[in-house]
Image (cartoon, rainbow, N blue to C red):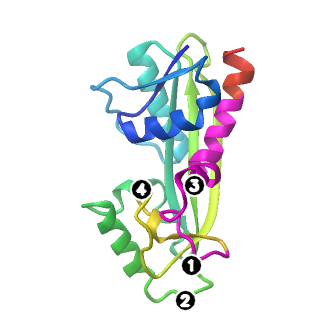
């Protein structure tokens, strides 16, 4: 059974395929078509996930899975949140630098944050095409400096709660098990196994 991941990111395909290897004999995950580029106008992660899943399913007439995620910093009233990828122009490094600068006066103990990921499954053959939704949350805190070369985005400044280890320092398998995306994905895989690919 082929299922479309509503993304053109081969890194995300590799990560989620690795986490789904228990279903490898029954499910093949594929990237969305090259022309896939929906406008993410949702006010929430779930709304954006639904936009992407619906668009990919409409283009391919196949079951599609999409995710949307972001970083929410308590001291910044939940920002950058759904706008994490567009927090500022430039690279991931530019966004991390801006965040650290914005938190420069916030002391240790007041720098709590969380990564949030929402996923949606769209089945174009169903009248209610969104057939499943999932959410994963990974609590932690923002450090004062970057550490680690792994991961991407805000990973080098996101520390696990009560730990001196950042998301960028964790081995990939451990990060994928603990992370917001990993937690949401496990729910999706369980749904697929019980409902769609018996």
* Proximity of marks 3 and 1: CB atoms separated by less than 8 Å: no
Mark carried by residue 83: 4
Q: CA distance from mark 4 to mark 3?
A: 23 Å
Image height of 178 relative to 148, above or below: above
Residue at position x 58%, y 27% from top? 121
Residue 122's spot in the image, x, y percent? 55, 23
Nearest-to-viewer mark from 2 and 3:
3
Residue 116's spot in the image, x, y percent? 57, 54
Quadrant of the rendered structure where residue 138 is? bottom right
The 10 Å Cα crowd at callout 4, few under 14, some 14 to 19, many 20 or more, is some
Residue 32's spot in the image, x, y percent? 38, 26
Quadrant where the C terminus lies? top right
Mark 2 vs 3, N-terminal side? 2
Which residue is identified by label 2? 107
Is residue 41 found left or right of 46 in the rendered image?
A: left
* Residue located farthest toward the left when viewing the structure as drawn: 90
Dot 1: what SS? loop
Mark 4 vs 3, N-terminal side? 4
The 10 Å Cα crowd at callout 1, few under 14, some 14 to 19, many 20 or more, is some
- Name the chief secondary structure element in magenta: helix
The 10 Å Cα crowd at callout 3, few under 14, some 14 to 19, many 20 or more, is some
Q: CA distance from mark 2 to mark 3?
A: 26 Å
Image height of 127 relative to 147, above or below: above
The 10 Å Cα crowd at callout 2, few under 14, some 14 to 19, many 20 or more, is few
Which residue is identified by label 3? 175
Which residue is identified by label 1? 111
Residue at position x 40%, y 41% from top? 11
- Front residue (pair 146, 79): 146
């Amino acid at each position: 059974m082929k299922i479309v991941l509503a993304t053109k990111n081969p890194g995300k395909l590799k990560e989620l395929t690795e986490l789904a290897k228990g279903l490898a004999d029954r499910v093949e995950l594929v990237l969305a078509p090259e022309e896939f580029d929906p406008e993410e106008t949702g006010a929430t992660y779930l709304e954006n996930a639904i936009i992407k899943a619906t668009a990919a399913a409409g283009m391919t007439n196949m079951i599609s899975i999409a995710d949307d995620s972001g970083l929410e910093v308590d001291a910044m009233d939940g920002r950058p949140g759904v706008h994490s990828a567009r927090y500022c122009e430039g690279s991931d490094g530019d966004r991390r630098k801006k965040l650290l600068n914005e938190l420069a006066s916030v002391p240790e103990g007041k720098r709590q944050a969380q990564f949030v990921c929402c996923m949606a499954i769209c089945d174009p053959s169903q009248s209610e095409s969104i057939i499943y939704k999932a959410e994963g949350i990974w609590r932690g805190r923002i450090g004062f400096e970057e550490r680690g070369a792994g991961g991407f985005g805000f990973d080098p400044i996101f520390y696990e709660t009560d730990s001196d280890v950042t998301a960028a320092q964790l081995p990939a398998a451990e990060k994928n098990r603990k992370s917001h995306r990993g937690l949401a994905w496990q729910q999706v895989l369980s749904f697929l196994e019980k409902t769609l690919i018996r």
